[in-house]
Amino acid sequence: MDNRVNRVSTLFFLVSFVLLGSVSPTDVYGQAEEATRRRNFNVENGVALREFDPVSYFDGRPLKGTSAHYYTHKGITYYFANAANRDKFAKAPDKYEPVYGGWCAYTVATTGERVKINPSTYKIIDGKLHLFYNFNGDNRLRRWNADEQKLRAAGNRNWTSRMH
């Protein structure tokens, strides 16, 4: 019996050592960050921006992306209209990712809530993509423009507190 208990204990120790040794603290932190991002970003069917190409906004015309050209950054998948846009994004994802996880910037700023967006209603501010709700005559980009500086500050505070 003692021999069998020793073998089981040794096996348990070896399996634990292998499993724990194969996961670094960096991996655990990265996985936790990705899980937080997936929980907080505006993702539909596993894809951000309602399948619109984030790089295309910076060219002045939002284009629908395709699954043929996709890239996943820190747990968030984006579709692109072409391989060139995908490659641009891959080189500088923080430049192209929408602020506030792709939720309506106005609503994040005013209430802290996450509200869907119309991917065609957007504004590039200081090189960052801001998206807005625009349905049933309620264009929140117009409201945003009325007091942008104050709303940006509030949105940044609300988003930072939400991401933790």
Image: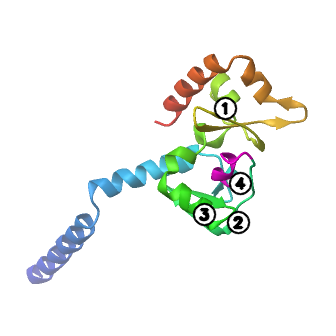
Cα–Cα gap, marks 1 and 2: 25 Å
Give x and y (percent) for residue 58: 65, 45
Q: Which residues are magenta?
A: 53-60
Residue at the right extreme, as displayed? 136
The mark found on residue 145 in the picture is: none
The mark that comes first in sequence, 1 or 4, is: 4
The mark that comes first in sequence, 4 or 2, is: 4
Cα–Cα gap, marks 4 and 2: 8 Å
Relative placement, left or right, of 118 versus 85 is right
Contact (CB < 8 A) between labels 4 and 2? no
Cα–Cα gap, marks 1 and 3: 28 Å
Contact (CB < 8 A) between labels 1 and 3? no
The mark found on residue 66 in the picture is: 2
Q: Residues within 10 Å of mark 3 (few under 14, many from 20)?
A: few
Q: Amino acid at mark 1?
A: Ala
Mark 3 falls on what kind of element? Answer: helix
Q: Residues within 10 Å of mark 2 (few under 14, many from 20)?
A: some
Rendered image quadrant of residue 3: bottom left
* Residue at horizontal 66 percent and vertical 32 percent from the top: 105
Contact (CB < 8 A) between labels 3 and 2? no
The mark found on residue 105 in the picture is: 1
Q: Residues within 10 Å of mark 4 (few under 14, many from 20)?
A: many
Cα–Cα gap, marks 1 and 4: 17 Å
